[in-house]
Amino acid sequence: MTALTEHAVPENPGWLSRAEAWLDDKGKGAWIAAMVLGFIFFWPVGLALLAYMIWSKRMFNKSCSRRKSWHSHMSAMKPSGNSAFDAYKSDTLARLEREQQEFEAFLHRLREAKDKAEFDQFMDERVRENRESDETGDNA
C-alpha cells in the first residue's frame, strides 16, 4: 500500500471523489442544485450535502473551482521569461484586441443599418397609411 500525501489524488478515485470533482467543475450552482435535489428526494442527503458544503467552505467561496481558472488567466498575462514568446504573445493579444474592436464597430454599424431600415420601413408605411386615409376621406 502506498501512503497518500495530503495533496495527492488517488490513482482510482471512487464515485464520491469523481462526483465531488464534477460538482467542483460545474461551480457553486451545481452544489446548491445537488443539495436541493437531496432535500427533495431524501432529506438526510440534502442535510449531509449542506453540512459538507459548510464544513469544506464551499458555501462561502465565490465559486468552487472557477477561482482557479481566473487565477490561471491572470498568470497568462505575466511574462514567461522567453522574450521571443513574450513578443509573439503581446503582438497576438494586440491583434486580437484590434480585431475585437473592429468586430464590435462592425456590429454597431450593422445594428444602426438595421435600425435605419426598420425606421424607414415604419415611416413608409405611415406615409402610405396617411395617403390611404386621405384618399378614403376625400371620397366619402
Image: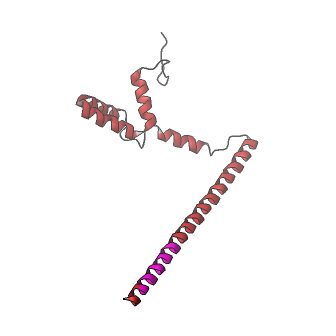
Classify 132 as above or below 92.
below
**Residue 50 seen in the current view:** no
Which residue extends farthest front? 139
Which quadrant of the structure image shows residue 101? bottom right
Image-quadrant location for residue 98: bottom right
Instruction: Tell me where residue 55 appears, x and y as whole percent.
Output: 33, 32
Instruction: Say which residue appears at 54% left-offset and 70% top-offset.
Output: 117
Vertically, is 41 above or below 59? above
Q: Residue 106's x, y, as percent? A: 62, 62
Among all residues in the image, which is located at the extreme top?
1
| Front residue of 73 and 135 | 135
The extreme left residue here reads 43
**Left of 67 or right of it: where is 55?**
left
Q: Taking 20 as reference, is 79 above or below it?
A: below
Specify start and end residues of the magenta stretch as a single range: 119-135
Q: Residue at x 71, y 44 (%)?
A: 86
Percent position of residue 8, x then y = 50, 22
Q: Is 58 placed above or below 114 here? A: above
Q: Is residue 133 magenta?
A: yes
Q: How many marks?
A: 0
Residue 44 in view of the camera:
yes
Pinpoint residue 10: horizontal percent, then vertical percent. 48, 19
Query: If the image is split into quadrants, where does the C terminus sit?
Result: bottom left
Instruction: Please name the residue shown 36% across and 41% down the image.
Output: 60
Find out whether residue 117 is within the magenta segment.
Answer: no
- Closest to the observer: 97 or 114? 114
